Amino acid sequence: MKGFWIVSLLLLGLLGGAAVAAPVISVDNPLYAASVQSGSLVTHAFLLKNAGDQILKITGVRTSCGCTTTTLAKTELTPGDSVGLEAVVNASGFTGTVERTVTVQSNDPANVSLVLRLSITILAPVEVPPAQITVGDFQKLFYVLIDVRTPEEFATGHLLGAVNIPLSEFQQNLAAWTPRLPKDVPLIVTCLIGGRSGQAAQILLQAGFANVRNLVGGITEWTNVFGPQYLFAF
């Protein structure tokens, strides 16, 4: 009888040990909370660990919405091994607090589906009002950029903000333009290389416009230095 009980106890011990032997999935913290600006990408790595004594196999990872993606470097963990599960949430288009989940499926018999949670408070974008300028200050910065090439040349590419008044207009129809051009702000005159604009600038000076400047090298020099920056074509 004594031998029977000893054998029985040994069998129970072996069966109990077999029952305990299993993979166990654990995580450092199943909840991650953060506050971000709208439009941000929220990234967090959950640390998964095999706390059991058998190989843990991660058989699947699914997210609660398409705005959340995950990356997992390996899917099998030996006892004591760990791996980072990176989750990325696109916060664009959301405001307030949103909850996103990541479900990790494994062969842990006690926790087949481990649910990880991301609680994200999405702050409304901060609106920065545009800087203001008074009309008086704007007038001090004002200038008129005159391109004296032909309309066909002007259409191929001109500096942004330029007005097209061909040189022939100043030569043949100056009286029609002098009342329309301001005398209290700079007149900057340009053409392809600076020759025709130099002639137009001289005509304007003789007509009483004291603040006239010829753009040296014209559009050609501008392109050599700045490329197509601020050039506009029809």
Image: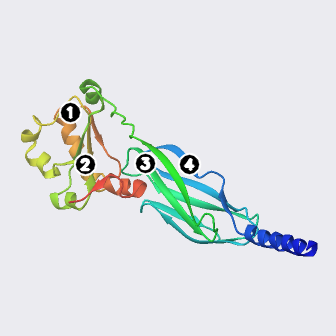
Amino acid under disc 4: Tyr
Determine whether, in the image, residue 228 is placed left or right of residue 52.
left
The residue singled out by tag 2 in the image is 197
The residue singled out by tag 3 in the image is 98
The location of residue 42, given as percent across then percent down, is: 51, 52
Neighbour tally class for label 4: few under 14, some 14-19, many 20 plus, Cα within 10 Å: some
Tell which of 47 and 59 is nearer to you: 59
- In this rendering, the answer to whether 205 lies above or below 38 is above
Spatial distance from mark 1 to mark 3, Cα to Cα? 65 Å
Mark 4 and mark 3 lie on one chain; the one further toward the N terminus is 4
Tell which of 130 and 106 is nearer to you: 106
Tell which of 142 and 222 is nearer to you: 142
Amino acid under disc 1: Phe
Badges 2 and 1: C-beta atoms under 8 Å apart? no
At 52% from the left and 53% from the top, the residue drawn is: 117
At 37% from the left and 57% from the top, the residue drawn is: 223
Neighbour tally class for label 1: few under 14, some 14-19, many 20 plus, Cα within 10 Å: some
The residue singled out by tag 4 in the image is 32
The residue mark sitting in front, 1 or 3, is 3
Where disc 4 sits, the SS reads: strand
Which labelled disc corresponds to residue 209?
1
